[in-house]
Amino acid sequence: MSVLSRLNPFAGLPNPKEVWAWGMFDLANQSFTLLINTLLFAVYFKEIVVADESQGDRLWAILFSSSMFLVVLASPIIGAIADARCWRKETLMLSGMGCIAGTCGLALVKPDMIWLAALLYIPANFMYQIGENTLASFLTDVANKRNIGRVSAIGWTMGYVGALCLLAFTFAAMLIFDLKDVSNWRPLFLFAGIWFLLGMIPSAIILREHKRPIVRLRENVIADAFARVSQTLQNAAQYRQLRLFLIAFFIYAFGIQTVIAFASILARKFGFADTQLVLFVAQITLTAGIASAGTSFFQDRIGAKRTIQIYLVVWILSTTSLAILSASSSLPEWLLWVIGNGIGFGLGGTGTASRSMVARFTPRHKAAEFFGLWAVSFKLAAAIGVLSFGLVKAGLGDTNALILLAGFFVVGFILLLPINESAGVRVAQRANREYKREAQASD
């Protein structure tokens, strides 16, 4: 029994059921980030809808980036509204349903329907990204300062468990229903939407937003949201460590988002097709899940900053190797599988550690707002990084684009060096105490 208890990731948590329900949304939305953004729809759009390699790269980069620019504009305001009115649960559920509707609609997209693809994909990705931001903000509700790294890793790992299940179903569907040809992938988009819908049910029933004192700056909800964001920007000097981290994160997130958006396209360029492509992405997903789960055992002890630095070194080695492989025609195929493991470890480790770093620097009453700012950094990185990579890839070739990719992680590592994690935690704790005093005085 004691052995089983040690293997249970929720053992010892004060609120295991709530953490599980929170993680289930991460498991559910993997159907969009994996099957739509990373594995299937990116390839389907390029090869079937556009049916032109270079034009497909450009249009996919534009499609993905334009939706991200919209997220960048909206995230801080939506986060501030959710904080000011305690509407994070409502925001999470509405964004999930909007993404599900758009995802199912992608099954209607046929060759040459570029505009329909854009009209369905852009809002669906927008809703997915807003939901991801809102879900991350719940970390300050479901975790405490002693287990925040562990809980973040649990949620991230559940996402990868969902991704592995999705890959198994996709692989089986390709074999059983003869869906190996790209032109036959449309039923899989419908499956992605249904998976999301069923998977988010536990979050809808169990997950709750912890009530807290509210200090409203304006009575009108929109005016209040803008006032809260303005106040945060004016007080940016107070959150110096968060600001420094978001700058560093912004740069290395260029690389992370680019890998997510172009993973299947790059793999096909290296000769992986159909079921082999699914197996390659499954390998990356498995190693990412292992990294995420493993990170939970040491992140709270060594700190989020050191954890991120370890995984950035893995990213630098992996992407540099990928550039070398692209430049040479004589290197063996098995080397790409090895590099894929490095990419997987980088994805799993930097993801959970970056999210917990933001949570450590965040006062509880500004959770959705600060994670909205984190989202601005992450999504703007996607918009700029993916667009620049796509244009460089289309104009200067794969090798130069991969060199650019490695450079993102090198610069991010350098910018991470001056951050003082302990100082950032102390500022967040002091802000929490001041807010409680202010709320009590206003009663």
Image (cartoon, grey):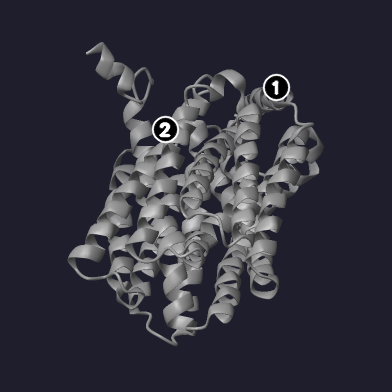
**Residue 154 screen position, x and y as percent:** 42, 33
Name the residue located 38 percent from the left edge and 50 percent from the top edge. Answer: 282
Identify residue for label 1. Answer: 422
Figure check: 27 above or below 151: below
Residue occupying the point 47% across, 35% down: 292
Is residue 145 at all visible to an observer of this figure? no
Q: Is residue 194 visible to the viewer in this orientation of the structure?
A: yes
Q: Is residue 85 left or right of residue 100?
A: right
* Placement of 347 over or under 65, stated as above or below: above
Q: Which residue is mark 2?
A: 154
Q: Residue at x 64, y 39 (%)?
A: 312
Between the residue at mark 2 and the residue at mark 1, the CA separation in whole angstroms equals 23 Å
On the rendered structure, is 319 left or right of 160? right
Local SS, label 1 = helix
Quadrant showing the C terminus: top right
- Amino acid type of disc 1? Ser
Q: Residue furthest left?
A: 176
Give how far across and how far down residue 79 sits, in percent.
58, 49
Residue 278's place in the image compared with 436, above or below, is: below
